[in-house]
Amino acid sequence: MYNENDINSLKAELIAKAERIKENIGKSKNEIELMRNQSPTDEGDYAVLINDSSIEDTLIGKQIAELKEIELALDKISKGNYGICEMCEEPIGIDRLKVKPFAKFCISCREINEKEIAENNN
C-alpha cells in the first residue's frame, strides 16, 4: 500500500505539526491570560477584550481538534492501520495524505461526509 519511506516522512510531518500546534496553544493561552488580567478603562476596551478572548478561545478549540486528529493518525501508524478510509475502509491515496497527513477519509468519502455535515447543519 505505502512504502516505509512514505510512512516515515508522513509520521515526521505529523509529529512536527503536533509540536507547532502545542506551541501555538501555549502562546494563545498565555495571551488570553494576559488579556483577562487587564483592566478595561471603558466599555469599548471591555468589548475589545471580550471579543479578542472569544476569538482566541475559538482558535484554541480548532487547534485542539486538529491536534487530536494528528494524535489519532500517529496512533494508527503505530498500530499499522494508517491511511485506511474510516468510511469505505479502502486505502487513502498517498497524494491526499501528503496534502493532509491526518486525513480520515479518501476523497470520495470526504465529499460524502462533508455533504452529510452540511445537510445536518441546515
Image (cartoon, grey):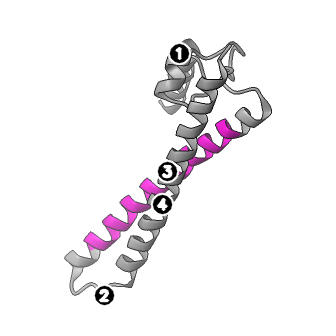
Query: Does residue 102 show up?
Result: no
Going by the numbered disc 1, the residue's amino acid type is Ile
Dot 2, crowdedness within 10 Å: few (<14), some or many (≥20)?
few
Q: Position of residue 95 (x, y in %)?
A: 50, 17
Identify the residue shown where x is 58% and y is 17%: 106
Q: Position of residue 79 (x, y in %)?
A: 79, 33
Residue behind mark 2: 39
First in sequence, mark 4 or 3: give its number: 4
Residue behind mark 3: 63
Residue behind mark 1: 107
Q: Which residues are magenta?
A: 47-74
Closest to the observer, 39 or 59: 59
Dot 3, crowdedness within 10 Å: few (<14), some or many (≥20)?
some
First in sequence, mark 4 or 1: give its number: 4
CA distance for labels 2 and 1:
49 Å
* Image quadrant where residue 89 sits: top right
Identify the residue shown where x is 75% and y is 26%: 81
Going by the numbered disc 3, the residue's amino acid type is Gln
Dot 4, crowdedness within 10 Å: few (<14), some or many (≥20)?
few
In this view, 16 is above or below 107: below
Dot 1, crowdedness within 10 Å: few (<14), some or many (≥20)?
some
